[in-house]
Image (cartoon, rainbow, N blue to C red):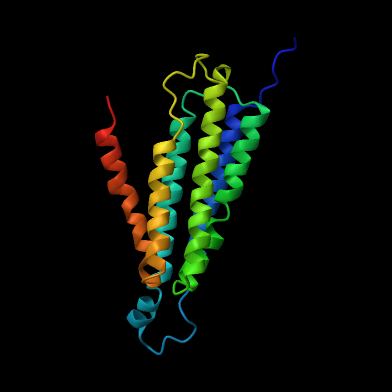
């Protein structure tokens, strides 16, 4: 039987870091002042509130995604073809975040924009769980040859999914405040960590 063909881990790390850095940077391009501010800079900045909120929420969610990816890959020593394809799929759905962020920033009054954003965020989490399930099923990909103790990430996915559902629910009542629901990610994460058996 031929030896498995693995891709260099450092090349995948560079790809992930590069795409996430660009994606996070693209978020700020949605923050533009109106052409004519009529001498009222603070008033013009106040009109950017939905865009600023969506930018901050998306930036922090992407930072959490990157942190989770780094943690999940800490012990990974080898990248097979399927793992590479799952990471590329994860990057694909992640790279759409600047577009969906613009939707909720420019059309925060429309529940549909919040639904599209939530679907995007949940898709990122689902692909991450699939990636981690692949890792668990293939212990040879780990440096030590064992997947024991490797988290599938379902808790993180569930927490972000609950926050996304809360955002969609709020969007049907007060759509301009729907993005605020993503703040739930941090207290729910703290609660989940506190409740997790040691």
The answer to which of 69 and 86 lies nearer the viewer is 86
Q: Is residue 122 left or right of residue 92?
A: left
Residue 6 drawn at (x, y percent): 66, 23
Residue 67 drawn at (x, y percent): 42, 39
- Residue ID at (26%, 34%): 195
Q: Quadrant of the N terminus?
A: top right
Residue 81 drawn at (x, y percent): 68, 29
Q: Is residue 22 left or right of residue 198?
A: right
The answer to whether residue 163 is above or below residue 29 is: above
Q: Is residue 31 visible?
A: no
Residue 44 drawn at (x, y percent): 39, 81
Q: Is residue 61 left or right of residue 198?
A: right
Q: Quadrant of the C terminus?
A: top left
The answer to which of 100 and 181 lies nearer the viewer is 181
Residue 96, located in which quarter of the rendered image? bottom right
- Residue ID at (56%, 62%): 99
The answer to which of 92 and 28 lies nearer the viewer is 92
Residue furthest to the bottom:
38
């Amino acid at each position: 039987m031929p030896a498995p063909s693995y891709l260099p881990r450092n090349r995948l790390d560079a790809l992930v870091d590069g795409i996430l850095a660009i994606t996070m940077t693209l978020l700020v391009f949605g923050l533009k002042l109106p052409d004519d501010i009529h001498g009222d800079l603070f008033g013009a900045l106040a009109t950017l509130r939905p865009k600023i909120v969506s930018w901050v929420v998306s930036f922090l969610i992407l930072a959490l995604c990157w942190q989770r990816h780094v943690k999940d890959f800490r012990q990974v020593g080898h990248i097979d073809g399927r793992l590479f394809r799952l990471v590329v799929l994860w990057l694909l759905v992640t790279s759409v975040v600047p577009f969906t962020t613009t939707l909720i920033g420019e059309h925060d009054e429309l529940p549909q924009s919040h639904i599209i954003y939530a679907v995007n965020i949940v898709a990122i989490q689902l692909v991450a769980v699939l990636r981690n399930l692949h890792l668990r099923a293939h212990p040879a990909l780990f440096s030590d040859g064992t997947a024991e103790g490797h988290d599938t990430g379902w808790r993180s996915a569930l927490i972000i999914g609950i926050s996304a559902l809360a955002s969609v629910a709020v969007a049907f009542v007060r759509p301009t405040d729907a993005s605020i629901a993503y703040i739930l990610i941090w207290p729910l994460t703290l609660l989940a960590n506190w409740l997790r058996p040691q």
